[in-house]
Amino acid sequence: MDAIEVARLQEYLRTKFSVPNLTVRERPNKDDSAEVYFGDEFIGVIFRDDEDGDVSYDFNMAILEIDLPERPAS
């Protein structure tokens, strides 16, 4: 992905989720994906899919169970 594509994705995600400190950054040595950060925290990867001329993007975010809020008492 080039800088313009990364900037467009960043603007889309910031607007869609109302998160102004979300950033999308180019990945070194990779041209099919970009990294997504919330502040300084890495949260996921966006992959570009260009199949038959139709471009789409896949956002993958891993969530660790230890990062989730405590379970409510039963």
Image (cartoon, grey):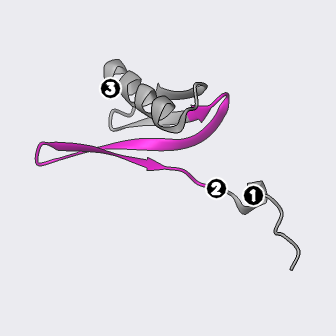
Left or right side of 1 for 39: right
| Residue 60 inside the magenta-drawn segment | yes
Q: Is the residue 4 above or below the residue 9 in the image?
A: above
**Looking at numbered disc 3 in the image, what kind of residue is underneath it?**
Glu
Helix, strand or loop status at disc 1? loop
Residue position for label 3: 5
Could you tell me which residue is drawn at 45 percent across and 28 percent down? Answer: 10
Q: Earlier in the sequence, mark 3 or mark 1?
A: 3
Q: How crowded is mark 1: few (under 14 residues within 10 Å), some or many (20 or more)?
A: few
Q: Which amino acid type corresponds to the residue marked 2 in the rendered image?
A: Ile
> Residues at badges 2 and 3 in contact (C-beta under 8 Å)?
no
At a point 69% along the width and 58% down the height, the residue shown is 64
CB under 8 Å between callouts 2 and 1?
yes
Q: Label 3 neighbourhood size at 10 Å, few (<14), some (14-19), many (20+)? A: some
The prevailing secondary structure element of the residues shown in magenta is strand
Q: Which of marks 2 and 3 is nearer the N terminus?
A: 3
Q: Which of these two is toward me, 58 or 16? A: 16
Is any atom of residue 12 visible in this view? yes
The N terminus sits in image quarter: top left
Per the image, label 2 sits on a secondary structure element best described as: loop
* Amino acid at circle 1: Leu
Q: Residue tagged by mark 1?
A: 68
In what element is the residue under mark 3?
helix
Rendering coords of residue 65 (x, y %): 72, 62
Residue that label 2 marks: 63
Structural crowding at the residue carrying mark 2, measured as other residues with C-alpha within 10 Å and reported as few (<14), some (14–19) or many (≥20): few
Relative horizontal placement of residue 35, taking residue 56 as reference (left or right) = right
